[in-house]
Image (cartoon, rainbow, N blue to C red):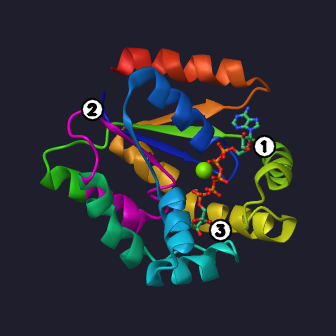
Amino acid sequence: MKNIIIFGAPGSGKGTYSDEIVARYGMGHISTGDVLRAEIKAGTELGQLAKSLIDKGQLVPDDVMVGILASVYDKQEPGRGVIFDGFPRTIPQAEALKKMLAERGHEMGNMIELVVDEETLMARLLNRAKEQGRADDNEETIKARFEVYHRQTEPLAAWFEKEGIRNVFTWKGSKDLMLSEIFAFLDKAE
Ligand code: AP5
Ligand code: MG
């Protein structure tokens, strides 16, 4: 399987659909949010920095994220493809990803963009707050995450468009429908 970059606003389903894609195609999964939350749990220096930013809904600096990218990628099983979930989030991160993969003779593969209205996103994240209690799932921080997404991450969609690998999937009220559209695309893309 080619690599996949799953892209979308907080709560758009990056993690949820990544799990489904992994179950179907057996690829690797790198969630930079999960990587950072593990660092927070382990109490590392990176974790302390990440916590101070994640709690405010702000991004961890590009140089820090790019610095950990290759080491996380190189731990994956070679040859089966990886889903990048939550990375890249800025144009410098995208350029760094492209370069890191090119250095290894690998391609970015396909970008899957999840488009979901903000009311649905907010409802999902507030619901997750009740179930899982993730520290950044409170109304104030969620609003900051949406704002950061619009300002720093959404412009990256045009970068993927130029690379010729952007594929948009719009929420129409059914998870099964979304999933069948994504699978139909990936079955053909393989
Ligand atoms: P990250 O962990 O990536 O969080 P996020 O982008 O805010 O996205 P979420 O994980 O909240 O949502 P998701 O799109 O994965 O949706 P999910 O499938 O969970 O990043 C967290 C923070 O880390 C950032 O704010 C930043 O500070 C830092 N960070 C991470 N990467 C970084 C980077 N590259 N550079 C700099 N900083 C970085 O779905 C949400 C909920 O909806 C779930 O509970 C799900 O069960 C539910 N749900 C209900 N119905 C559906 C449905 N139909 N489809 C999908 N999900 C549904
Ligand atoms: Mg996630």
State which quarter of the image contains the C terminus: top left
Please give left or right for residue 49 compared with residue 122 in the image.
left
Magenta-highlighted residues: 75-99
Q: Quadrant of residue 133?
A: bottom right
- Tell me if mark 2 has few (under 14), some (14-19) or many (20+) residues whose alpha carbon lies within 10 angstroms of its own: few
User: Which residue is found at the position 58% from the left and 56% from the top?
Assistant: 154
- Tell me if mark 1 has few (under 14), some (14-19) or many (20+) residues whose alpha carbon lies within 10 angstroms of its own: few
The image shows a total of numbered marks equal to 3
Read off the residue under disc 1.
Answer: 117
Q: Secondary structure at mark 2?
A: loop
Please tell me which of labels 1 and 3 falls first in the chain: 1
Q: CA distance from mark 1 to mark 2?
A: 33 Å
Q: CA distance from mark 3 to mark 2?
A: 32 Å
Is residue 136 placed above or below 120 in the rendered structure? below
Read off the residue under disc 2.
Answer: 80
Q: In this orientation, which residue lies closer to the viewer: 158 or 42? A: 42
Read off the residue under disc 3.
Answer: 148
Please tell me which of labels 1 and 2 falls first in the chain: 2
> Would you say the beta carbon of the disc 3 residue lies within 8 angstroms of ligand 1?
yes
Q: Secondary structure at mark 1?
A: loop
Name the spot of residue 1 as percent of width and height, x first: 31, 27
* Mark 1 residue type: Asp
Return the mark for residue 3: none
* Mark 2 residue type: Arg
Please give left or right for residue 3 compared with residue 20 in the image.
left
User: Which residue is found at the position 76% from the left and 53% from the top?
Assistant: 132
Please tell me which of labels 3 and 2 falls first in the chain: 2
Q: In this orientation, which residue lies closer to the viewer: 71 or 63? A: 71
- Tell me if mark 3 has few (under 14), some (14-19) or many (20+) residues whose alpha carbon lies within 10 angstroms of its own: some
Q: Is residue 92 magenta?
A: yes
* Mark 3 residue type: Val
